[in-house]
Each structure stands twice: as C-alpha cells, then as structure tokens.
C-alpha cells in the first residue's frame, strides 16, 4: 500500500512540474519555481493546491 501511495505522490509531482514548465505560460518565473517547490515539499497536497489555485483554466 505504501508503494502505491508513493507512486501516486511521485506522479502528481511530475505532473505539476510538467504542467508548470510546459503548459502554464501565464506564470512568472518566480511563481513557477514556487509551485514546483511546493509540489516537491508537500507532494499531493501541493499538487491539489496547484490544480485549484495555480493552473490556468
């Protein structure tokens, strides 16, 4: 079970990094770094926050 949770967290962090770098052109460089940092530090919580707060619709 721990391995599955770790994989989910890993995938969510990779998704945030990919989306911030390639898809979300509206963010400043500092905001991109902060979102990536938040995803790396907070894992799935950072990814959820990015989805609702940082991702352009």
Image: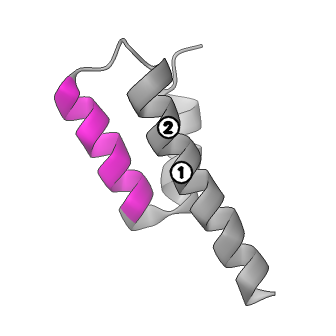
The quadrant the N terminus occupies is bottom right
Judging by the rendered image, the residue that carries numbered circle 1 is 14
Secondary structure type for disc 1: helix
Label 1 crowding class (10 Å Cα cut-off): few <14, some 14-19, many 20+? some
Which residue does the image show at 73% across and 84% down from the upper left? 3
Secondary structure type for disc 2: helix
Task: Tell me: 38 left or right of 6.
Answer: left
The quadrant the C terminus occupies is top right
Q: Where on the picture, by quarter, is residue 15?
A: top right
Q: Nearer the viewer, residue 56 or 8?
A: 8
Question: What is the spatial separation of the Cα atoms under label 2 and label 1, in whole angstroms?
Answer: 6 Å
Residue farthest to the left, as pictured:
30
Which residue does the image show at 31% across and 20% down from the upper left? 27
Judging by the rendered image, the residue that carries numbered circle 2 is 18
In magenta, the rendered stretch is: 29-40
Residue 34 drawn above or below residue 41:
above
Q: Where on the picture, by quarter, is residue 5?
A: bottom right
Residue 21 drawn above or below residue 44:
above
Q: Give yes or no for contact between labels 2 and 1 (Cβ–Cβ under 8 Å).
A: yes
Which residue does the image show at 58% across and 35% down from the upper left? 51
Residue farthest to the bottom, as pictured:
2
Is 27 in the magenta? Answer: no
**Image coordinates for residue 29, horizontal then vertical, percent:** 20, 27
């Amino acid at each position: 079970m721990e391995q599955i949770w770790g994989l989910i967290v890993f995938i969510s962090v990779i998704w945030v990094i990919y989306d911030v770098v390639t898809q979300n052109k509206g963010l400043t460089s500092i905001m991109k770094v902060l979102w990536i940092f938040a995803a790396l530090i907070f894992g799935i919580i950072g990814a959820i926050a990015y989805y609702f707060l940082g991702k352009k619709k």
